[in-house]
Structures are given as C-alpha cells and as structure tokens.
Amino acid sequence: MKYLVRMDVNLPPDMPREQAEKIKATEKAYSQGLQRDGKWVSIWRVVGEYANYSIFDVDGHDELHGILSGLPLFPYMDIQVIPLAKHPSDIH
C-alpha cells in the first residue's frame, strides 16, 4: 500500500544543540535505511519549513504506524497520513 505522509518537525527551542544534532543524525540513518529497503520511496522538503512530504510503500497501516512511530523525531512531529489508491488514468 502506498501512503503520502506530511511530517512537520517541532523541536523544542530550548533543546540543547548537541541533543538536536544527535537525534537528527539518528533520524537520517533510520530514514536512509528505509529508503534503501524500498519502504520510504521518496522524500521532498517543504520549502521554508522544517517539514517534508514522503511516499511510503508498505504492507499496510500497521507497518506504516510502526515505521513512523519508530522515527527518532516522532515525539516532535505532527504527521498527516493519506492512503493512496491507483488512479485509473495512470499509464504505469
């Protein structure tokens, strides 16, 4: 199943810089592993915001929930999930 996911990150302004950098590095490694595995199909930054739109291709809702809740930045995110269905006009 494919999903369009918007993630808005809201790190606390008083979070120490070292802690923020460490969690971001852990997040990057986690997300890149999912990309290599084909689960996190693509990711786009939202210009001017600490946010992204991503496409996930996973077995279902439970797998997506596990992936998203496993994100190191999950406690600091607002997440919107839109399940996607194939469009009848898609030539692929």
Image: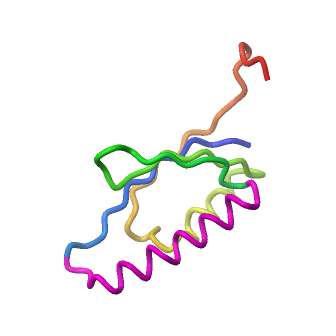
- Magenta includes 60? no
Q: Is residue 37 left or right of residue 79?
A: right
Q: Position of residue 52 (x, y in %)?
A: 44, 49
Q: Position of residue 80 (x, y in %)?
A: 47, 47
**Looking at the image, residue 7 lies above or below residue 14:** above
Q: Is residue 62 left or right of residue 11?
A: right
Count of marks placed on residues = 0
Q: Position of residue 69 (x, y in %)?
A: 55, 67
Residue furthest top as drawn: 89
Q: Position of residue 59 (x, y in %)?
A: 78, 52
Q: Which residues are magenta?
A: 14-38
**Image quarter of the C terminus:** top right
Comparing 75 with 56, the one in front is: 56
Comparing 57 with 65, the one in front is: 57
Dominant secondary structure, magenta? helix
User: Residue, x 71% and y 13% (percent of image)?
Assistant: 89
Q: Is residue 91 left or right of residue 73?
A: right
Q: Which of the 4 image quarters holds residue 71?
A: bottom right
Comparing 48 with 73, the one in front is: 48
Comparing 18 with 60, the one in front is: 18
Q: Which of the 4 image quarters holds residue 40?
A: bottom right
Colour pattern of the rendering: rainbow
User: Residue, x 74% and y 51% (percent of image)?
Assistant: 58
**Looking at the image, residue 60 lies above or below residue 4:** below
**Image quarter of the N terminus:** top right
